[in-house]
Image: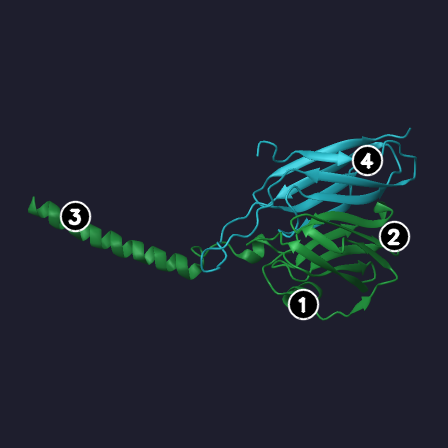
Amino acid sequence: MKIAVRASRTMTRRTMLGTLGVIALAAASGTLTPPRRAGAQPLGLNESLDEAMTRVFGSRSIKDGGSLIKLDIPLIAENGAVVPVSVRVDSPMTPTSYVKHIYVVADKNRIPVVTRVTLTPAAGQAFMGANIRLGETGDVRAIVEQSDGTLWQVKREVKVTVGGCGG
Amino acid sequence: MADIGKVRIRIPSSIKPGEVVQVRTLVIHPMERIERDREGRIIPKTYNYINKVIVTYLGKTIVTFDTTQSVSENPFFSFAFKATDPGPLRVEFLDTTGGRYGGAVDITFA
């Protein structure tokens, strides 16, 4: 009886030490840390507008595209949970000159980058539409990247009566 | 929630060859928002939302949307494409939990 107890006690201590070692190793190699957010959300992160703009566009200059881009969005959004937005760009959409990406960015959202649309010349027209969420009153911008890499943007202020982002 | 993943695609009733057509599409999906605890910290978990939409026509990808949680519940998208030949137009929605929801329409000329 006595021997059994002693044996079980030593076993406990050994297994305990062993377990601790495994935990330490796991922590060191990073297997215990929760999944990295960067991998799960490469496009939309919980970040400020400036962080988002630098992360997506780096230090590239963005020109004013008022004559080129038509951003269609209501001036007043009564329900921030569903705000229809559409973007149309004047572009020939030929294999040599076309619109590569249309970004929609909501300045005041906790996740500013709403969507990135990748277009091909087969689309025939640089157009996109979506229903987006807006957390509060603020600018919504459409940023267009052409096939030669130039960036254009337009922005419009949207008044939001009831925010739709929660969290 | 039984309807999750139901895809709807709307095309104009008559399409002429070579015409640029606007298509509207919708998927039933909760698009979970970020949740916070009482101290305002984000609860780390895998949020279930659509993060990619792929549109293919005649087997070729023509438009893709990369989306975030800033897109509304039951996300609706529209896009344009040039109808050159009769054939299938497919829209596929991918979410963060590995779900794939697809829909297709046949493009025919009147």
Q: Earlier in the sequence, mark 1 or mark 2?
A: 1
* Label placed on residue A8: 3
User: What type is the residue that disc 2 sits on?
Assistant: Pro
Distance, label 2 to label 4, CA atoms, is 25 Å
Label tally: 4
**Residue A69 visible, this angle:** yes
Evaluate whether label 1 is on the same chain as label 3. Answer: yes
User: What type is the residue that disc 1 sits on?
Assistant: Thr
In-image side of B55 versus A49 (left or right): right
Relative to B30, residue A37 above or below: below
Q: Colour of chain B?
A: cyan
As drawn, the chain in green is A
Q: Earlier in the sequence, mark 3 or mark 2?
A: 3
Distance, label 1 to label 3, CA atoms, is 59 Å
Distance, label 3 to label 4, CA atoms, is 73 Å
Which residue is painted at 64% across and 52% down in the image? B68
User: What type is the residue that disc 4 sits on?
Assistant: Ile
Chain where mark 3 sits: A
* Label placed on residue A95: 2
Which residue is painted at 81% across and 36% down in the image? B58
Q: Quadrant of the C terminus of chain A?
A: bottom right
